Image: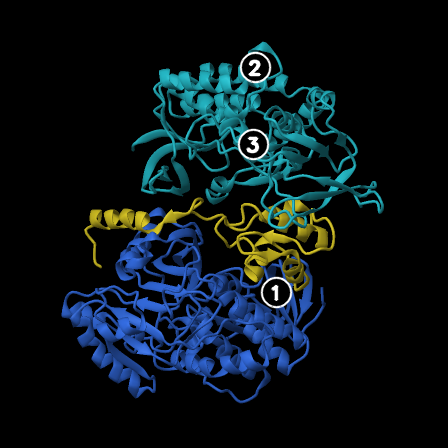
Amino acid sequence: MAEDLVIIGSGPAGLAAAVEAARAGVKVTVVDENASPGGQLFKQIHKFFGSEEHQAGIRGIDIGYRLLEECHLAKVKVMLNTAAWGIFHSSGNATTVAIKNKNDSLCSLDTKVVLLATGARENPLAFPGWTLPGVMGAGAAQTLINLHRIRPGNRVLMIGSGNVGLIVSYQLKQAGADIAAVIDIKPEIGGWGVHAAKLTRTGIPILCSHKIIEVRGLDKVEEAHVARVDREAKSIPGSEKLFKVDTVCIAVGLSPMAELAWSGGCRFAYLPELGGHVPVHNRSMETTRNNIYIAGDISGIEEASTAMEEGKIAGISIARSLGLLKNECAEELIRNKEKNLSALRGGPMGKTRKLAKEKLIRLFNIC
Amino acid sequence: MLMNNKPVTICRCEEVGNKTIEQAIDDGARTVDAVKRATRAGMGLCQGRTCQSLVAALISCKTGQPLANLVPSTSRPPFRPVRLESLAEVGAKLLLEKEADKI
Amino acid sequence: MKKSAQAVIIGGGIIGCAAAYYLAKEIDDVILIEKKCIAGESSGANYGMVWQQTRQDGYDLAAARRSLEIYPQLCREVFDLDIEYEEKGGMTLFFTDLQAEAAKGYVEYKNSLGVPVRLLSGKETRSLEPALSSRVTGSLFCAEEAQLNPFYTTLAFARAAQKEGATIYQGVEVLSINLDRGAVCSISTSEGKIFTNHVINAAGSWAGTVGAMVGLKVPVFPHRLQSLVTEQIPKLLTRTIQGSRIARTSEEAAKTFQYAYDTTGGNRPCINQQPPAECIIESSLFYAKPTVNGNIVLGTACDFAGYNRETSYEALAVIAHMAKMIIPRLKDVNIIRSWANFDPWTADGIPIVGETGVKGFFIAAGHGTGMSHAPATGEALAGLITGSAAAIPLGEANINRFTGYREEC
């Protein structure tokens, strides 16, 4: 068999897993459909919070470079512009990962273990006019400005006041766009106070209990209609506001990108706190399908820092399952990472996620 | 997830609107897969990656089913479009290996 | 849920839905129970062929020909949605001169049964389907054959049945069929009990499971067919084509069309016969169905893998290879999906339709050719249950053709 471990996705979870596994002697190949590795890290030009252990004060992009260097030193093979378009059970316990490269030529990797670190996708929001050019996901806007150095528009309405909505609004502002407003259907701001404060200091209004009614324009976004909502989220007549904008960004949450896990036959659980349907996994990050592991946002929407810790646990567990790490040794390492995860899942929002993640692991043992 | 009574496109690939989907639900479709079979929502180039959550929300909204029950329709490779010729090359190689290249 | 019915049909595929429609026309209180959704299994994943050139003499051919007669009328008078029924003819391709030779005898035989199939040269074939490769040395063409959209056709039958008063429950599972002195008296479902004296097992590849509920062995097995679906492209093919297996020796060539003769050679199949174990991916037939929307469905790779509905890397690649050889212009087209279904399989290739040794328990299952048979099967079954005259005789399709059936009863 060609490979010990194929990791799909070179974001923080995938790379962290690759480093841990490779250091233990696992032969690792990472595939990613993007031209550069690092996943969302390379879009994150802001500094991380938390403890020193979790690289607080360092920008996402620098964490990405650090991980890449570690991968290089650990002799991890990283295949870029390479999309995994299917995983198939092959003879024995092996898995075939079908991949295609940039030139559309195909090949396959036969591997003992697969780690799905495919991350998340942005949730859509359907309203009249949402298919007009100029309506996009906040993540897409962030990729445009921070990766490609292209400003998607000059005047932006942001829908959603979670961390993504707040951070991307600020970054759009830094890129020279005007932010007409950030709106949220909920009565309070979804993201962290620090991010919200940065916006309000620059005079950007954050309108809670507001929703988008319609986006209008001839062949691109020209105006957005917004209304205040009551407790049932119904719009209040007479409260409509019109914003002249050329861009509307949608930041209404993320969902695990889990098609490969579905097709692999993994069992799922529905946990809205984690973004919807999530593959059930055990403490080792292994799914209900032998030799298919997950880490990062695919196992529940969290953050880059938790994704890296989960990736490390997966990498260590995989090394152990391949006989390259002694059980006691692996167990100690995993307990250490679990402690880190526990610390990262602090605060009221973190606690909800922590409970949901614990439930996910409990569900693994219930058939 | 839908905002008002104006028609809204749900599946962008196949250009299926909310009215068509609501009709299918009225006609008895109770799963994302059933809506897909009845309306083509989710059968296009992106294979429902964008619209399936919207379809699930519509079904839940109209029937009161919890979102937990509304799983995506069967996930099938290829998860990214692949050129037929590229796949054919793999097939030719596999058949050669089996010495059964008959066509 | 209703507490009683005159007849309960198990299975919301094309056969169950057609049976529901024809029964509901004749009697009140028809219930159809489907564990997933209408057209949720094989009826939603097939090539939508209404063909006669490949049907075996007897019930198989009679049902196909009767259906070809009924469909246009259903489209005109009954269905309230467009099932994309198009009578464009069907084509079976071959690839060697030896096969063309073998085809002559086949055409004569089929013509004698009244099937208007013709032999076309390679050139004639390509004048009808210019996208076909020069490897195609000829074809069998039957103008009186059609294609349809399998989802919509199944849905159309379901809706027609509802209009006639049938009740359809989706997402409901049958747990047991209860007998009273050897006759059906009720069924228990995940949503409650229904009293009825007639149960129709239209569960396709799951017919065996349903049969076991009344202690009958119903020898229908899931035959996994895999297919690819292309993106939407401008028109490349006019009609559904089937590629025969390649034959290089006259012996092989003689077998080219064997599947459409009586394959049992007069021997009755056995109730305990299991499907062949070997993988037959390399010898599967080729199919290409152009859909109204512009996608082309390409198949097939067949094997017996139990109820494993995954698609395999090897199978998808081999289908693509066949497609490129036969329709070279497909090479730059994108594949956007694959699927696998469980085509119901019986040992002699003929479905099982009719009454059984258990009073009130009927079978209409084992249709690898559901789209070709559904209207005729539904009509005949309704006739059998209500006692009206049959348009086609069902005798040959009865389960008692299987040796060993009696011992099972």
Please tell me in which quadrant of the rendered image residue A93 appears: top left
Q: Amino acid at mark 2?
A: His
Letter of the chain shown blue in the rendering:
C
Q: Left or right of A221: which side holds C302?
A: left
Letter of the chain shown cyan in the rendering:
A
Q: Residues within 10 Å of mark 1 (few under 14, many from 20)?
A: many
Q: Left or right of A70: which side holds C249?
A: left
**Residue at x-position 73% and y-position 39%:** A243
Q: Nearer the viewer, mark 1 or mark 2?
A: 2
Front residue of C295 and C130: C130
Q: Position of residue C79 (x, y in %)?
A: 58, 76
Q: Residues within 10 Å of mark 3 (few under 14, many from 20)?
A: some
C367 over C232 or under it: above or below: below
* Residue hosting label 3: A151
C85 over A161 or under it: above or below: below
Q: Left or right of B71: which side holds A106?
A: left
* Same-chain check, marks 3 and 1: no
Q: Position of residue C110 (x, y in %)?
A: 30, 82
* Same-chain check, marks 3 and 2: yes
In the rendered structure, which disc, 3 or 2, sits on the residue that comes first in sequence? Answer: 2
Q: Amino acid at mark 1?
A: Ile
* Residue hosting label 2: A54
Please tell me in which quadrant of the rendered image residue A292 appears: top left
Q: CA distance from mark 1 to mark 2?
A: 55 Å
What is the drawing colour of chain B? yellow
